[in-house]
Image (tube, coloured by chain):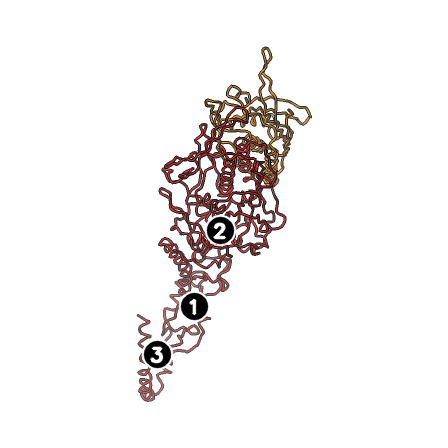
Amino acid sequence: MNCRSEVLEVSVEGRQVDEAMLALLHTILLHRSTGKFHYKKEGTYSIGTVGTQDIDCDYIDFSFVRVSSDELDRVIRKAVGEFKDAMGNGTDGMGQISLEFYQKKKSRWPFSDECIPWEVWSIKVNVVNLANEQERQICREKVGEKLGEKVINIVEVINQHEYLPKMPTQSEVDNVFDTSLKDVQPYLYKITFQITDTLGTSKTTWFCAY
Amino acid sequence: MMDSDLSPQDKKDLDKFIKFFALKTVQVIVQARLGEKVCTRSLSSPTGSDWFNLAIKDIPEVTHEAKKALSGQLPGIGRSMCVEISLKTSEGDSMELETWCLEMNEKCDKDIKVSYTVYNRLSLLLKSLLAITRVTPAYKLSRKQGHDYVILYRIYFGEVQLTGLGEGFQTVRVGVVGTPIGTITLSCAYRTNLAFMSTRQFERTAPIMGIIIDHFVERPFGNMGHMRPCNYRAPGEDEGAYNGVEDSQEVCTTSFSTSPPSQCVFTVSKAHLKTPKPAVMDTLKVPMMGLAFSHQLYCSRLSYQPPVLVGAADFCHPSTLNAANPHQVTTQMGIPGKEGGVPQQVPVQPCHGAQAEHGRVSSCPPADHVPATPSSSGEGAETLSRSIEVKGVSPCDVLETTFTRKVGAFVNKPGTQVTTASLDLPFAAFAPRAYDLEENDPMVQPPESPATSSPLQGSLHSQGSGESGGPAQDDFVMVDFKPAFSKDDLLPMDLGTFYREFQNPPQLASLTIDVSSQSMAEDLDSLPEKLAVYEKNIDEFDAFVDTLQ
C-alpha cells in the first residue's frame, strides 16, 4: 500500500500563519474524524455524533468549519503555535507543516510497533512581510481566496475515496484511531514541521500529536 | 433497472439513505446561508437520530420545503434536487447567486456495500458540503445580509437550471458517491459576474455588491416553486418545539460490525417519538428577532408562514413591510442592520398562503404596494405600514405651514405689505398702497440661507437628505431663521439704536394737516357711499375679524 501524499502551498503574512494552518488542518481533520466507537457484543459497534462549528479568522477574510472538540482544537493549536514560533515573528521565511495519518502495526518483541503512514498532507508556507496597511488589507482578501481554493483541493482529494484503513475490531481500534479524546475519534495522526530559514538551512522538528 | 441485483433490504436502505441525505444536504446549505455561525455539539454516545453520525439540526420549515419539492420522489437519474440561493435587495431587485445540485448519473458500483461504505461515504460528502458552503462567494454575502439585502433559498426538483447565474459561472464539485443504482454527485454552480449596474440603492452607503445587468431577464421556466427566506426559528426554552426528529420519523440506528463486510449489520427502524429531546444541544448563536428580520426574504411576495409550534417563540416577519416601504421602514422605524442594535418587534405577518399555494413565481410587484393580509396580525402590520406612510407625509406639512406668515393690517410697512387676495383691508385708501407679491415678502419666502447653517436648520432636515434644501427636495424645506437684532437680521442694528430711531414715529399721513385740509363736507358726502359698500361686504369683514381671533 502506497502512502498518498498531497502538498498544499500558501503565502501568508506573519500574523496569518496561525489561522491559515488551523483552517487547513481542521478541514482535513473534519474529514478524517469520526464519532466515538462503542463496541457491543457480537462484534458490532455504534458510532457517536460529530458536531461542527464555524470559525471566523481575525486576520484573514475567511471562515472554516472544524470538528466541535475543544480537546482536538487545543492539540492542533499547540502544534501550530510551535510551528509559528519556529518560523519566527515578522521575518520572511519558509516552512512546511505536515499532517500524517498512520496505522500502527504490532510487532513482536523486541521490535517496537511500526507506524505506517497512509496519507500525508504537507502544507508549505511562505511568510512575507508587508510594508503598509493597504497591502495587508489586500493580503487579507487574497489569502482568504487562496485558502478557499485549498479547501476545495482538500475536498477533491478526500472524495476520491482512495485507501482508508479497515474498520478495526475493539482490540485493534487504538492501532487505527486516536481514542484519547472524549468526544471525537480522529484517525491516528502526527504533526511535524520543517523550517527553512533565510540561510537555507532546514530544521526538522517532530511534534508527535499522539 | 440497475438495481436488479440489489437485495430488497439493501434497496430499501439505499433509498432511505438517499432520501435523508437529500434532506440533510438542504439543511446544511440553507443553514450556511442564514448569516450566522453554526455550532453543534459532538456527542460521544449515539442517540440514534443523527443521520450519518453528524450533528446537523433540522429546521422544520426547511425540511417541509424540501419534502414538498421532492413530493415523495427521490433524486435519481434525470431527477435532480436543486437548492437555489438568491439575493434580494431592499428595493426589490433579486439575483441568483448559486445553485447546489444533487444529481445521479448512470455509473453504478455494484460491488459497493450499501449499509456500510455508501453510508460512510455519504457522511464524508456531507462534511465536504459543510466545508465548501463556507468557501463560495455567497457565504460572505450571507454573513453580511441585513439592511440592504437578504438571502433567499428555493428548492426544486427536476432539471437543473443555471441560466440565472449569468455568464461565466463557476462550478465546484463537492464530491461523488458510487452506489449500486448510480453515482450520486453533489456540486455547486456559483455566479462570478457581480458587476455593478445601479448605484441608486447604494448612494447612502457603500455598495456591498453590485447588481448584474441581466437579472431582469424573465425565467425561462414556469412553475419554479417558491423562494423562501433563509429563516430560522429558534427553539423555545424547553426546546420542545424544536425536535431533531419528528414524530414517526424514521430513525437511523447505526450499528456496524467489525466482521468481514459480508456480515455487516445495519438496522434502520421506525421509531415513534413523542417528545424526544433534540439529539444535539444546538447552540446556534442567533439573536432570534434580529435574525428573523434580517433574513426575511421573499421573492414575488411569497412569504412562507410556518405553522405555529407550541413553545416556539414568535419571530419578526416584516418582509412585507420591507418590500412595501423599504426606505420608510428603515428610516421611520429605525431598524438597524445586523450590525446595529436590536430591531423592533413587529406583528407576525402571515404568509400569502393563497399565493404560495399556486406556485407562482411572478416578478416582484411595485415597491409601494402593501399586499393584503388575511389575519388580524396582518392587519396590524398593514396598519403599521399605513402609519408609516402617514408619518412620512406629516413632517412636510408641518414645515410648509411655518412659512405662511401674514403681515397684519394697519401696519405701516411700505413695500412689504401683504394683501390677501380675497380681502380688502378697511381704510385701505388711507394707507400707502404697494401691491407686493408674496414671493417678495421675506417673511414668507426667506432669502437663501447663508453658508453657515444654524442648528435649528440642521434639525429640520431629515437624515440622509441632500445638501441643498431647495425646491428640488420635496421632503423638507429649508428654514432660515433670523432672530430680531441678530447680526443676520434684515435691519442690522442693535436694540438700543432701534428704540431711539423709532421712539418718535412720524405722524400718520391720514392725520396730517394736508389731509385735514380737505373739505370736511366732501368727506361727509362720500360717507354714505362708503358705508353702503362696507355694508355690502359685511360678510367679508366678519370673516376678517374671525381670522384675527
B223 or B171, which lies in front? B223
The reply to whether the C-beta atoms of the residues labelled 2 and 3 are less than 8 Å apart is no
Q: Are marks 3 and 1 on the same chain?
A: yes
Q: Is residue A86 above or below residue B132?
A: above
Label 1 CA crowd tier, 10 Å (few <14, some 14–19, many 20+): some
Q: Quadrant of residue B405?
A: bottom left
| Total marks in image | 3
Residue on which the image places disc 1: B444
Label 3 CA crowd tier, 10 Å (few <14, some 14–19, many 20+): few
The image position of residue B437, as x and y in percent, is 45, 73
Q: Is residue B254 above or below residue B483?
A: above
Quarter of the image with the N terminus of chain A is: top right
B384 or B503, which lies in front? B384
The image position of residue B330, as x and y in percent, is 45, 52
Comparing labels 1 and 2, the label whose residue is closer to the camera: 2
Cα–Cα gap, marks 1 and 2: 56 Å
Q: Amino acid at mark 2?
A: His
Mark before the other along the chain sequence, 1 or 2: 2
Residue on which the image places disc 3: B426
Q: Amino acid at mark 1?
A: Val
Label 2 CA crowd tier, 10 Å (few <14, some 14–19, many 20+): many
Quick one: which chain is red?
A: B
B533 or B376, which lies in front? B376
* Colour representing chain A: orange
Q: Quadrant of residue B4?
A: top right
* Callout 3: chain: B
Cα–Cα gap, marks 3 and 1: 23 Å
The reply to whether the C-beta atoms of the residues labelled 1 and 2 are less than 8 Å apart is no
Please give left or right for residue B407 compared with residue B222 in the image: left
The image position of residue B163, as x and y in percent, is 59, 51
The image position of residue B439, as x and y in percent, is 46, 71
Judge whether residue B519 can be spotted in this image: yes
